[in-house]
Image: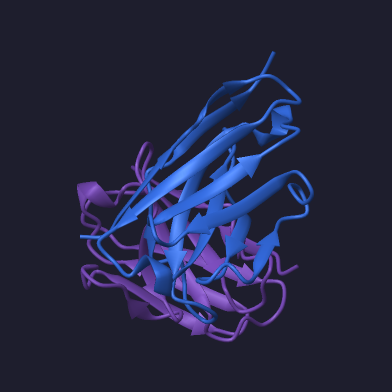
Chain colours: A purple, B blue
Amino acid sequence: EIVMTQSPDTLSVSPGERATLSCRASQSVSSNLAWYQHKPGQAPRLLIYGASTRATGIPARFSGSGSGTEFTLTISGLQSEDFAIYYCQQYNNWPPWTFGQGTKVEVK
Amino acid sequence: EVQLVESGGGLVQPGGSLRLSCAASGFNFDSYEMVWVRQAPGTGLEWVSRISAGSSWTSYADSVKGRFTISRDNAKNLLYLQMNSLRAEDTAVYYCASYFGSGWPFDHWGQGTLVTVSS
């Protein structure tokens, strides 16, 4: 099973600033890495797949990078609706599909 | 518009059973593989089970293997999760999600249904 580890657990950011979230895989997942946004009481939302491709309708302020075992999600110019929990997920070796433990982006 | 709507959650005693449903609309349900993912209180997302588009292949997390059964009815655009021998640690919000197949992420998700296992 591939273990996904995200850092930090919590990120305090002021609106308008940039947030940088990290995700590390215990072994290479190539570019088969997705990022999801999750708000309480809502459905998780696919943001990024293929490590760097934005999903349909996702604003350009969300960008992803990396391959192999190290990945980054960057949110440029944080808006109020971006404060949420973000999960990375590998879909290279399955089952099981595995998620990171999540990074909570909160208002500073 | 793609919609996934879960139902069937509730309070059940340890050792009991529950069947979750997920109603799909807005896409070619019979062309997509489907999964169940859960989130226990205070924790992250955990994949639970998967079923292929034509029901030929299923997979389960070790934590539910032998107790949960995934199935689907493509004629009715419905996905199911039969949960037996429920334990307190199965308490979670259960989400259904779709994906196009190997090499694709989970692209659409429902809002979830809460399952509480408690006496």
Residue extending furthest toward the front: B75
Instruction: Compare residues A94 and A1 and report the one nearer the observer.
Output: A94
Number of numbered discs visible in the structure rendering = 0
Residue drawn where x is 51% and y is 75% of the image: A33
Residue drawn where x is 47% and y is 43% of the image: B21
Quadrant holding the N terminus of chain A: bottom right
Find residue B29 and report its image quarter: bottom left
Query: How far across and down, in percent of the image, does residue A35 sit?
Result: 44, 66
Residue extending furthest toward the top: B119
Query: How far across and down, in percent of the image, does residue A66 sit?
Result: 50, 82
Left or right side of B12 for B63? right
Left or right side of B24 for A5? right
Would you say residue A8 is visible in this rendering?
no
Quadrant holding the C terminus of chain A: top left
Instruction: Compare residues A53 and B110 and report the one nearer the observer.
Output: B110
Left or right side of A21 for A57? left
Residue drawn where x is 64% and y is 64% of the image: A4
Query: How far across and down, in percent of the image, does residue B20 sit?
Result: 52, 40
The correct choice, above or below, for A29 with respect to A73 in the image is below
Residue drawn where x is 74% and y is 30% of the image: B87
Find residue A63 and report its image quarter: bottom left
Query: How far across and down, in percent of the image, does residue A67 sit?
Result: 54, 85
Instruction: Compare residues A78 and A48 and report the one nearer the observer.
Output: A48
Would you say residue B50 is visible in this rendering?
yes
The correct choice, above or below, for B20 with respect to A58 in the image is above
